[in-house]
Amino acid sequence: MGVLTRGKPTLGLTLLSMITQETPGVRIHIVDTGETAVVRRDDVVAALRLAFDRGVQCSYERTRQVQRNFSAGRLTLLQNLTGPHIVLMDDDIVMPGLAFQRIANYIAAHPDYGYYAPYCVNIATPKAAFEELGANHYSPGGVIRQDARVRAALLDYYSSSLDVLDTSGDGVKTWDIAFLSALLPALGRSAVVDKQHIVYHMDYQERPNWNLVQDNLILASVRRAQELAAKYES
């Protein structure tokens, strides 16, 4: 489990929803790109202490980059998440108690899957941003099967691309949700969203990010996914 945070107040809830799952063998890694270290907050300290008590491996690191802060944070996560199954989580998403069990059951039944994503309730992304992606777009909390080709493409993307969520930088922008939604099918992998597997977006005050519906953003993201899929075809 990889959690990228800039210090949202909901981070403690996100961590607790993962730490209190009953499915064993999960490791959580937190990458903090905020101006102040979230590891000093009382709610995060309490969550990490609970993780220790429950035997859940939970690690933390902080990185600060003025440009490409989102992409650099994702890259740092991936450099630490080397296992065959990875989950990219936002710091304002909570999972119900059986979420990990659903994921484990799906992996057992579909060992050659691409990604298995939840349905997000109260998602802040404008619906228009998903029109070109279709119903089976990736969402935070989705598990990705990270074989060698997928890992190479992900590391390449977050090393070199300028994401729309990055604070600054020059170049053609892409959006990682659109990229992930297109990458796995481009690599010949399945992309599934299960509407019975629900997660909840907890930042009820967050305004829709209309940058996600700008012209050509989805097209550029899909094109980048196709380019990297072809690059790592063999």
Image (tube, grey):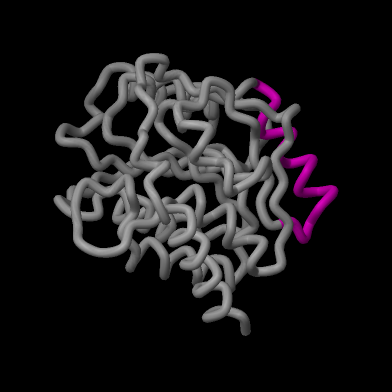
* Magenta-drawn stretch contains 10: no
Residue 63 percent coordinates (x, y): 23, 49
Horizontal side of residue 159 vs 144, given as left or right: left
Above or below for 37 versus 61: above
Near-viewer residue (188 or 209): 209
Above or below for 26 versus 184: above
Outermost residue toward the front in this view? 215
Near-viewer residue (56 or 196): 196
Above or below for 234 versus 33: below
Stretch of the chain drawn in magenta? 97-113
Task: Please say whether residue 20 is visible from this viewpoint.
Answer: no
Total of numbered circles in the picture?
Answer: 0
Residue at image position (55%, 70%) is: 226
Residue 138 percent coordinates (x, y): 58, 45
Magenta span: predominant SS is helix
Residue at image position (64%, 67%) is: 186
Residue at image position (73%, 57%) is: 190
Please tell me in which quadrant of the rendered image residue 48 appears: top left
Near-viewer residue (187 or 178): 178
Task: Please say whether residue 40 is visible from this viewpoint.
Answer: yes
The quadrant of the image that shows the C terminus is: bottom right
Residue 192 percent coordinates (x, y): 72, 46
Near-viewer residue (149 or 127): 127
Residue 223 percent coordinates (x, y): 50, 67
Outermost residue toward the bottom in this view? 234
Residue at image position (62%, 42%) is: 25
Please tell me in which quadrant of the rendered image residue 188 appears: bottom right
